[in-house]
Amino acid sequence: MRLFAFAACLLLTPVAGAQTASDVRMAPDEIQAAWRVETSRTSSIEILGDQTRVARYGRDWASWVTQADGQMWLDMSQGALFARAADQDAVVRTSLYAEARRHLDIYVALSEGGRRDVISFGNAGTFDRVWLEAATGVASQTGTLAMTDTPTGFIALYDDQVVFSADYGADGSRCDAPAIGPEHASSALAWLPYVAPIHPDIMARLAEDARFPCAFSFVVYSPDSPAGRLERWTRTSEADAAEPVMPPLPQGSVQVYAGADRLHAVLTAATDTLDGVYGAGPDTADFFEESQRLQEEGDFAGALLVQIQETHHFGPCPEASIGSARLTCAYASALALAGRQDEGFQALAAGLDALKRNNPALAVERFAPFIDREGHAGAAARLLTANALIAWGRVGLQARPDLDPAQLLAEALIMDPFAPDAYWHLGQRYLAAGAPGPAWSLFDLGRQLPRPIEDSPLAEADTLEARMSDLAPYWLPHVEIAR
């Protein structure tokens, strides 16, 4: 049977560059593995390519050099993938949940959520869904491949064709170095999807053993290899390839979050906030005092916006706000009474009412005149307008081309980087746009704020990650090899 896939095409690894260090020393709790990688056609034993790839494994991390001489560091304790571009000081940090979401999005888009058994890939032809699952590391169901034990390990079959084999070393083994032991097997397993297109069924079978194979092979079909190719990875005692630089990150490295290229000002404001540049941030009493001052000055609309921004920090007002620490909530009724004749206050109130009545168009009309304000009031106006635009959908974006919800949310975060809600809503905007790297950068930074987030939308990031753990477990940091 002719198998079609594009595993190599979709094995997307972040761009990175090599960092040489001839005198890097091995720590006692790490090992180095040199892998000989041989490539041939599936229909021939002729070797088309032969190279050595080197990786190092700690107890909860792996570091390796890519085929493009890139430097990668997978840190499971931090739940992050680090990449250093060639001849650059910047080390880009990407959440492993963002990596999982990226591969899941590819799988869902091309397989229609796992419903299509045969998938078209343009001029490359059609292929069975199983090969998309191997390429992305995501599968809608288990048990697609048949596993059979061998004297040296196991093989995986699809339609009676061997598509993967694992060799742990024994009589008849082709290894000349031992299998990777229990101390480092989890790290090797976590590293594997980043260097090879391995089906989740195979990952699950590998996870059942306390060791990681000293040799493995797999079949790849892709637009680059329409006739198919076979890759054989064998651990050797040789190490003639570039050695990966080990953590801690190279001296002089500048760590940046994924998305810094497009969200530089936003991420700078967030990291400065966490570094204490702006102090401890306002508390509930500070918001009350600011709201009261604006009310005394006759700026009832500004006072209301400050009250709203307080909820973007500390969550919705409690039902019994009288006597609580949420002073702006306790005095909300008094402000409404005082501002009943104020035109600006009534416009904002009408916008809030429009949102409750599912009329985002009217809400945008009422909120937009206030987006030129500064400080907490300006941040609240931008958040309100952006979220109303998003609720309005494509029609709203076409009706108000002068308003960009992502830009409004970014401005709101820069103006008030202590508000968890801004991180969540801007992250969601990037997630919807197919950019999970920046999205999780925002989620991760927001969850580090000196703020309780249990009652804020940002708490939903934890729920989102729990779902990701079920859908794409082998991209994530918590997976351990069964002992």
Image (spheres, rainbow, N blue to C red):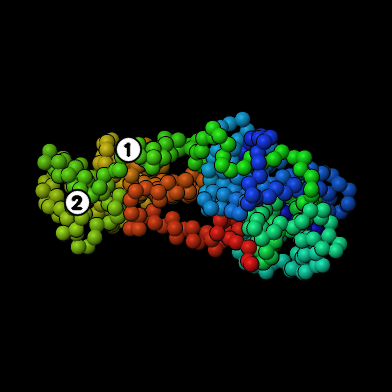
Report the disc number at residue 328. 2
Judged from the image, the secondary structure of the residue bearing numbered disc 1 is loop
Relative to 80, 355 lies left or right: left
Going by the numbered disc 1, the residue's amino acid type is Tyr
Residue 441 in sight from this viewpoint = yes
Quadrant (top left/top right/bottom left/bottom right) for the N terminus: bottom right
Residue visible at 67% across and 64% down in the picture: 210
Going by the numbered disc 2, the residue's amino acid type is Thr
Q: Which residue is mark 1?
A: 278
Q: Residue 69: horizontal and vertical position, in percent?
A: 68, 37
Pick the residue in front: 98 or 22: 22
Q: Residues within 10 Å of mark 1 (few under 14, many from 20)?
A: few
Residue visible at 44% across and 58% down in the picture: 462
Q: Residue 58: horizontal and vertical position, in percent?
A: 62, 51
Instruction: Report how far apart the C-alphas of labels 1 and 2 lie in the structure.
Output: 23 Å
Relative to 325, 135 lies left or right: right
Residue visible at 86% across and 54% down in the picture: 43
Pick the residue in front: 372 or 47: 47
* N-term mark: 1 or 2: 1
Q: Residue 478: horizontal and vertical position, in percent?
A: 55, 59
Q: Residue 172: horizontal and vertical position, in percent?
A: 86, 62
